Image: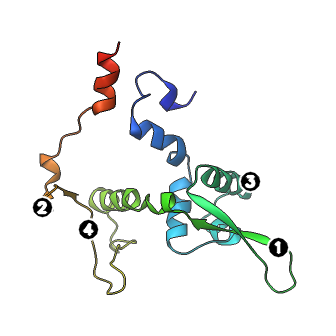
Amino acid sequence: MRADELPANRLCPIARSMTVLGQKWTLLLLREAFYGRTRFAEFSRIGIPSDVLADRLERLVNAGLLQRQPYREGRGRQREEYHLTPAGRDVLPVLAALSAWGNAHLPIREGSGVVYAREPDGEELELHFVDRAGHVVADSEVAMRRGPAYHEFVSGQ
């Protein structure tokens, strides 16, 4: 049973997201796609077994995060590349949040292995909560609360 099928998780967007993003290797494959990797052999360099790679790429295509595009090198046979879709690009803040957490709580001597920067000037960026007026809000001031779907569900019982 998937986590989002359990009654306690049915309305939770985190549980729904985990059905797509929560499998081992998935976020690393998306990281590689953001680095510009598109081909099966390029993705396999992260150390993922070929059968698992094929499965994860298929799942990402079925979930709408990657799309296949045919290519052919010279007279070789036609193969497929994998490119981020708009939904796949929307995972970028998730990767940035994981990177920030890892840098803060699991640092390495060499520094950050991932930097987020603005195109085209290269200015480094950070991920923050921002209010409607555009002001940065400290994480310590942010509370996670149940949303309208939960309240509608509870009142409808």
Residue 12 falls in image quadrant? top left
**Pointer 3 residue:** 51
Q: Amino acid at mark 3?
A: Asp
For image coordinates 73% across by 58% down, the residue present is 50
Position in image of residue 55 (x %, y %): 69, 51
**Pointer 4 residue:** 126
Secondary structure under the numbered disc 1 in the rendered image: loop
Looking at this view, name the residue that lies furthest to the top: 157
What whole-number distance in Å separates the C-alpha atoms at marks 3 and 1? 20 Å
Q: Earlier in the sequence, mark 4 or mark 3?
A: 3
Q: In the rendered view, does 130 fall on the left or right side of 17?
A: left
For image coordinates 37% across by 57% down, the residue present is 98
Q: Earlier in the sequence, mark 3 or mark 2?
A: 3
Q: Earlier in the sequence, mark 4 or mark 2?
A: 4
Q: In the rendered view, does 53 fall on the left or right side of 112?
A: right
Q: Earlier in the sequence, mark 1 or mark 2?
A: 1
Q: Amino acid at mark 1?
A: Gln
Q: Earlier in the sequence, mark 1 or mark 4?
A: 1
The quadrant of the image that shows the C terminus is top left
Position in image of residue 75 (x %, y %): 87, 84
Marks 3 and 1 close (CB-CB < 8 Å)? no
Q: Residues within 10 Å of mark 3 (few under 14, many from 20)?
A: few
Near-viewer residue (63 or 33): 63
What whole-number distance in Å separates the C-alpha atoms at marks 1 and 4? 40 Å
What whole-number distance in Å separates the C-alpha atoms at marks 1 and 2? 50 Å
**Pointer 1 residue:** 78
Position in image of residue 61 (x %, y %): 63, 55
Q: Amino acid at mark 2?
A: His
